[in-house]
Image (cartoon, grey):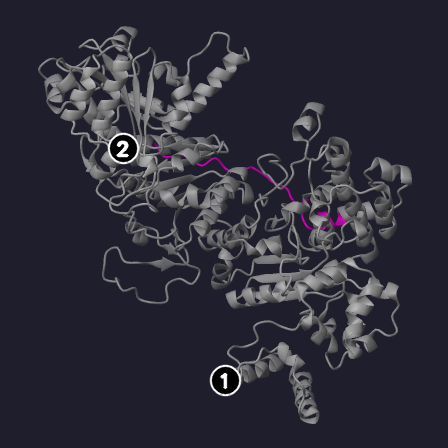
Amino acid sequence: MNIDPIRSLDLADADPAETREWREAFEAAVRAAGPERGLFLLEQLAEEARDLALVSEALPYSAYRNTIPLEQQPPFPGDLALEERLLAIQRWNALAMVVRANKAYGELGGHIASYASVAEIFETGANHFFRGPDAPGGGDLVYYQPHSAPGVYARAFLEGRLSADDLAYYRRELAGARAGVRGLSSYPHPWLMPDFWQVPTGSMGLGPISAVYQARFMRYLQNRGLADTDARHIWGVFGDGEMDEPESIAGLTLAAREQLDNLTFVINCNLQRLDGPVRGNGQIIQELEKLFRGAGWHVIKVLWGSDWDTLFARDTEHALLRRFAATVDGKYQTLGAKDGAYNLKNFFGEDPEVAALVAHMSDREIDALKRGGHDLRKLYAAFAAAREHRGQPTVILAKTKKGYGMGGAGESRMTAHQAKKLDLDALRAYRDRFQLPLSDEALERLDFWRPADDSAEMRYLRERRQALGGSLPTRRARADVLPVPPLQAWGAFALEADGKEMSTTMGFVRMLGALLRDRELGPRIVPIVADEARTFGMTSLFRQVGIYSPLGQRYEPEDAGSMLSYREAVDGQLLEEGITEAGALASWSAAATAYSVHGMAMLPFYIYYSMFGFQRVGDLIWAAADQRARGFLIGATAGRTTLSGEGLQHQDGSSQLIAATVPNCRAYDPATAGELAVIIAHGMRRMLVEQHDEFYYVTVGNENLAQASLPADAHADVVRGGYRVAIVTPAAGPRGAAPGEAGEAKRAQGVAAGPAAHDRRYLDARIIARGESGVHVRLLGAGAMLGEARAAAALLAEHWGITSEVISITSFSELARDAAQCQRRRRHGADRDGADSHLSRLLPGDAPVIAATDYVRAVPMQIAAYVRAPFTALGTDGFGRSDRRLALRRFFEVDRSEIVLAALHALVDAGGLDPTVIAQAIARLDIDPPASPPWER
């Protein structure tokens, strides 16, 4: 049979004398040979129990008590009275900030109960462990529980980093700016407070996975010899309810596998999520211990305060442990919300042995018993043990009360998370409980309070932070300017492709390999893949730069004889994360923010299936944007029709649209390797040299196509979002081509070359208004659809005598942003001369415009409002299908035939063609549309 080792406490003892002998023998062994001998004996007994099939595994979790016994608890090194005094002040200022905002300005939100439960945890770290940016070897990075932001602001107020006026504008950032003070963001947001918050944690669950990969990236920098991060530590303070998020636990095994002892999680176990108990019918602390132990973490539990130590010392028969094991969290929450008398009757009084342990205690003394997460001495011992532990990451499970100190207004109550206002009686009770020197008038005004600068409290506060290297959180955005190699040095093959066949994915990999060889930039590049590096043709990087592993390579790979064999190395440069897009994105974020976290610019390239980017981990990308990330996200096998045979779940039609919604993400969909090279060069200059807080999303495809060379005078327009590729005429050669030479050759292909160099960017009004045959359309092709637009232009010229202008759109979102900015300037009178947007210069006049994309129609529709001509958008709305590229493009109605039909229809509507041409075209193009559109099928 299998016996739960903890529940076995409830079993009757059939032979107490024998049990006593075993226990005395074990105690004697420990006293004689030390704790290591005791642990060894326990491991041997556990192994024997498994061999005898008594238990299926070793202890999955420990008893419901503190991990560090009193005799192993180090002396508290600080001034306990002063720290508790400072805690009381910060509790008040945090509470006043939230209540004041909601009382004066309506329902602005904010949270009182979260910081009330975590205050001791924050302050233990702030006074003794969280190293500031000026500490020897560099500062720590702290991921703060987001709902507790008012407590962080309250400490910054005491330190003099924020003023009372700043606190008065909590959650009123816009009003604060108008008043000339600093408004405070609701949660940790580096974008909004770029010199304060280090990392965003407001979307719960993202903090834990980000902390893991940030700790791992520190080791990556160390092992590659780029930075000395040995003294630095990652601390994450998270909630027990937050651990239900899949991202919260997604990186746990990585942290253990790579022995990240520079990482500590502190889980604020107040047993309550936003609306009720985390595990009403269970014990979340025991569950989390099993989870973390199973993942390979070192676990420290801080459950009971110092006042419990005497009870445990007297409880020789473990009666308390039996009661704890039998009490579920829903009951613990009720006990926390009630007074001492209730606890005496409904917890201690339910077991005669337990009742005897507290027979000498009054109701008031029972009420004063603290949970471990509110005891500074217990927390200090846990933090110290975590900081000193080697070989494993550590998690501290600290038991607290949500709304601690709020009494009937919210302590351990279901409504604690929503408590944002307190009446005067509740404020008086709060003041009296924490012995705050505030008058009733000050309470009613919700005055902030800071002791005099020369007071003992303030001197102590400053001394502690000075000893630890300065204030936290503090964000510094300094970084060295990293030179970018000339485009020709690594992208000449793409710019001068001259018809060579390749995919944009292969073009990217070749560029990346060349950039990695650059002496200055190369070592700072961080290539990242989730998995399937072979799919993207990146196997050459295995040998060139190696795959990062802190263990090196302890085996001979199966393909050892191959020139491109798998190679892991301690100083490997490629991060191959395995099948975890969330983990790979967290790695990318760590590298993309190294300029601020480490003062060292890095350049991460994360390449992945585009479908599993923004759609799958869009919240992590949004957090990276908040964190002012700098780097490249490469969405490979992009688009809905380029990935042959895959189907619904793998074909991406939305990432370009979602990318457009992120303010500091610049999204591009290049059609050629030359366009891709220009975009990467531009992005590197912007991020590494000019140090703009932006990142780039670039989609690349796996379709091998003949690549046209890209003239130098088109580079600027590639970055702006679009440039003219060709004018296709029915009979004559292209403008600027010599008759009988280039013109005849291009006419034979059905596609005209670009205009002469002096007229390459824009057509004049005469040609725009009327082509050689008397009609004119503009065909916009984006990414994979540029080839279809060129083919459609040839069909229009050959069969209908229509001149087409073919334009490559590299970024609909960049065109739309620029156009919106120009429109706004004119609307506000800031640009009275009415400077044209790039879009208006690219598409002047009223010639009909047909825009085709491999993404949903909403992508090209971003520019529709700024185009004066008739506008038709073709896109791949609907679910994907498995088939060949041509079949998919016909299904989604974005192929050359549909572009031709859309162009003819637009010209008919404009009055330039006879309506009968539509029926003729449908027959000629063999179009037989079903009754329902693709987005309904």
Residue under numbered circle 2: 931
Where residue 864 sits, quadrant-wise, is top left
Where residue 437 sits, quadrant-wise, is top right
Residue under numbered circle 1: 53
Q: Describe residue 48's horizontal placement relative to residue 773 as left or right.
A: right
Q: Describe residue 903's horizontal placement relative to residue 18 as left or right.
A: left
| Chain-order first, disc 2 or disc 1 | 1
Residue 562, given in percent of the width and then of the height, sits at 23, 59
The 10 Å Cα crowd at callout 1, few under 14, some 14 to 19, many 20 or more, is few
Residue 228, given in percent of the width and then of the height, sits at 53, 52
Residue 470 on the magenta span: yes
Q: Which residues are magenta?
A: 463-486
Q: Looking at the image, is mark 2 or mark 1 nearer the viewer?
A: 2
**Viewer-proximal residue among 249 and 853:** 853
Q: Main secondary structure of the magenta part?
A: loop
Look at 41% across and 18% down and name the residue there.
Answer: 866
Residue 162 on the magenta span: no
Amino acid beneath label 2 = Ala
Q: Is residue 518 visible?
A: no
Look at 18% across and 35% down and name the residue there.
Answer: 500
**Viewer-proximal residue among 494 and 817:** 817
